[in-house]
Every structure is written in structure tokens, then in C-alpha cells.
Amino acid sequence: MVGSSGSCENCKQDLEVYCPEIIWILKTFGGYSENIVIDEHFAVLIPNSLPLHGAAPLLCAGITVYSPMMYYGLCKPRQHLGVVGLGGLGRVAVKFAKALGMKVTVISTSPSKKNEAVERLGVDSFLVAMGTMDGIINIVSGPYTLLPLINLLKTNGKLIAVGASTEAPEIPYIPLMMGRKLIGGSTTRGMKETQEMVDFAAKHNIIVDIEVIPMNYMNTAMERLAKGDTKYRFVIDVANTLYSSF
Amino acid sequence: MVGSSGSCENCKQDLEVYCPEIIWILKTFGGYSENIVIDEHFAVLIPNSLPLHGAAPLLCAGITVYSPMMYYGLCKPRQHLGVVGLGGLGRVAVKFAKALGMKVTVISTSPSKKNEAVERLGVDSFLVAMGTMDGIINIVSGPYTLLPLINLLKTNGKLIAVGASTEAPEIPYIPLMMGRKLIGGSTTRGMKETQEMVDFAAKHNIIVDIEVIPMNYMNTAMERLAKGDTKYRFVIDVANTLYSSF
């Protein structure tokens, strides 16, 4: 985002992303521009200790998982957090949760993800007992039933959806009521919290796993995206000034 | 409830109702007993200013609506609360919300409920604009779509289900995410909060609309319940010492 009213109820609460007059970069010069002029309010300072390419996706993936962890209080040391799905968002969620001192369990239907989770990310477990989690960050909001996830939560547990899906799973009402549990949604956040998230990431050396590509690789990258042939997020080296993995 | 472990994680947080060793009165002498001996921890003091019969259903309906209002922060003056359904629970929710100084809107498919809501309960409106409510207490958790209710909520709005239903409506995921809204569940609560609720009710003269019946009317009352031929909760005058509406 590159502009908002600055005066609506949401802007006043540092929630520019919900401003009815929000201006997306797509409506100006686009996200692939080599140069763009914006109001300083919409610029985020990337601390020197973070590499620009590894930090870039924090402004989407990072704030998407960091914001609900703060808002829903799933950020306290020794709390037990479940992360459903170990794609790009899931990996970032694990990194933030570990930096916060939480116990993290990845819930995934792919056994192949187990090694990565345990060895690279320091996830604590793959097997979980019922009623043991304080919260779950749900990256994969697919059409499956949510009951098994709800059952993993303790009393007052929170299931937070951050993965966009047009599918609408059914709400397991009685288990929600009986455990005073909640299902919450969240997306990216305002500028103030985005800067806080980047500063936290810098302090804890959190960067996103990425594949850096030059501008002239874009068409191939789009084809690979369409085929699902990606493991990490693409970061475009617009000006060819960054290290490239090619 | 008349007993619990007193030592589990839930009991220690004054959430006896979630104790795995909870003892329900149904397993002892039953709710229709003339006399029962219980540990004082499970007794609630009814202040002298509240009539016993009007206060009795507070221990179910009252705590069911009061508890989520406190827990989810839907209890601040000038917040706008929606109440879906104007049955027994709905009327109690309105009374608590008005005593807390909230703006209350009843959402009902029965136009006939409008007069009662506005004239007897002091409800503020029946017609609502989108995106204007801080929270909604949903008494009628039926099989309908939740999207219209979610759309009534402001950013950060909360839809709380307190009406038991085995139906599982679909979750409107994207609207939840885009507005950081949540769907929460809640049921009755521990002894500490139950006493707080009764004290609050006494301070604000909140009683439940009831129909007092003598013990020998029980079979007829059960038949009327089965037919849905009730407007208010039945309170049984077990010892024939209360005012009776007969």
C-alpha cells in the first residue's frame, strides 16, 4: 500500500490496510517498477543487519503471521503453537514462534516435510496430543473439516486462518462453545506494526527462504508459479544489484 | 455443577466447568431435589434485592451471555452489540448489554419481536448498516450462512455463538481474514464469574423473564416444552414457597 485517507477510524488505529480509500501500488507504477516515490509514512526501514532480498517477503509473509500472533496473544514463551502447513507462510510462522520462545508443532499431511521442520527450523514435534495447544496458525485453509484442529486446542485455544481460501469449511460449533475456543482470521497489517515486525525480525535474524531471480526471468517464473514448481518465494532483482541464485 | 477436582489447570483458573472430573448435579440428587448438600465453593449467593425465582435462570442464561461479553471484551459503554434471536437467552443478553451502557441492536427474522425489543427491552434499533457492530451474540446458531452477520461487524469485530446447535454453518473465511474478525464459542463459566454475574445483575436489577410453575405441573410443562409452547423459562417452585403465576 502507498496511500490511505489518514483520517478514518481504521487509519487512526494504525490499521491503514482497512482504510476504504487505500491506494495499492498496483494502481500506481506497480510492484515491478525500478523507482517509485511514496509518502514516507508508507516506507519501511529495513535494518542494516537484514539482507534486502531475504527481508523483502517479510512485508507480506512476515506481517501476515506476526500480526495475528500479537493480536490474538499467541506470542508468549512456552505457549504451544501449532502451524498447519509448511509452505512459505508456515516456515515464517515457525521462525517467529521459535524466536518468541514458543513450543512449535507442525501439522502437515506430507511426511516429507518432517525432516525439514525438525532439522532446519527447530520444530519441537510432529505428533501431538489432544487438548495441548494454545493456538494454531492455519496456513492451509482448505475444504477439510476443522474438527481435528479444534480438538488439538486447549480450553480458550485459538485457531487463526491466514491462508486465503475461497473454500468454506463447516464450523464445529459445539466444540467451540464447550472449550470457549475461537476461529479468527487475519491478513496483513498497518505500517506501525509492519515496522515493529521488521525490527523484531532483524533482532532475531529472521529472513524468508527465497529464490532471487533477475527481471528477464519473469515469464519463466510465472510459468513455474502456474505449475506449482516453486519451493520458496521469488524475489525479483529489479535493478540487478542483488546476489542472484542463477 | 456440584464438584470438581480443584487441582487441574482449568480449576486453577476458575474454570471449573472445564474440569475433566466435574460432577454434575444430575449425577447426584438431581436438579428437582427439595434439599441438596454441596460444598460451599459451588454455592452462589443471591443478593437480597433479587427475587429467587427471577434470579434462578441467571445461573444458566445469565452466565452464558455475561461470560463471553466479558471474555471477548464486548462490554464497553457505547460499543455496538448485535443480538441474534430474541428468545430467553437473547432477552438476557439485551438486559446485560443495556446495563453496561452499550448500544444494542436485535437481529431477528420475526417482525413480531420488534415491539417487544424496542418497548420492553429498550433496544436501540432493528435496522443496521454494514460494518457498524463491535460484536454479535448469536443465540440462534442455525444452519444458515453466517456471511450477513460477519458483514455487519466492524474491523476486529467478534461473532460469538452461545446457542447450542449441532448444525455447522460454513465459515466465511475471506471476510474473516479481511476484517480480522473472529467467530468464538462460549458456554457457562466457573463459580467466581458466576457470582460476579449475579452481583452485577443485582446491582442493575436484571432478572430473567420466567413462568413459575408448581411441581405437580411438571408433566404438562414437559409437554409444552416439546411443542415449543413456551415464551419464557419455566422455574419450578419445588417447595411451593414462591409466588406462582397460576
Image: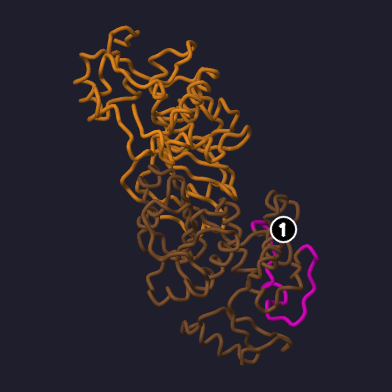
Chain colours: A orange, B brown
State whether residue B166 appears in this view. no
Q: Which residue is depicted at the point 74% across and 87% down?
A: B241
Q: Estimate the x, y position of residue A41 in percent, counting from the top left.
A: 41, 24
Residue under numbered circle 1 = B192
| Secondary element at tag 1 | helix
Apparent side of residue A159 relative to residue A163 in the rendered image (left or right): right
Q: Nearer the viewer, residue A227 or A236?
A: A236
Please state the horizontal and vertical placement of residue A77, each as a whole percent of the image: 63, 32
Furthest residue in direction front, as rendered:
A7
To which quarter of the image does residue B65 belong? bottom right
The quarter holding residue A92 reads top left
Q: Position of residue A46 (x, y in %)?
A: 45, 16
For the N terminus of chain B, the quadrant is bottom right
Picture coordinates of residue B188, whole percent (x, y): 61, 62
In which quadrant of the rendered image does the C terminus of chain B lie?
bottom right
- The stretch in magenta equals B18-41
- Amino acid tagged 1: Lys
Q: Determine whether, in the image, residue B33 is placed left or right of residue B130.
A: right
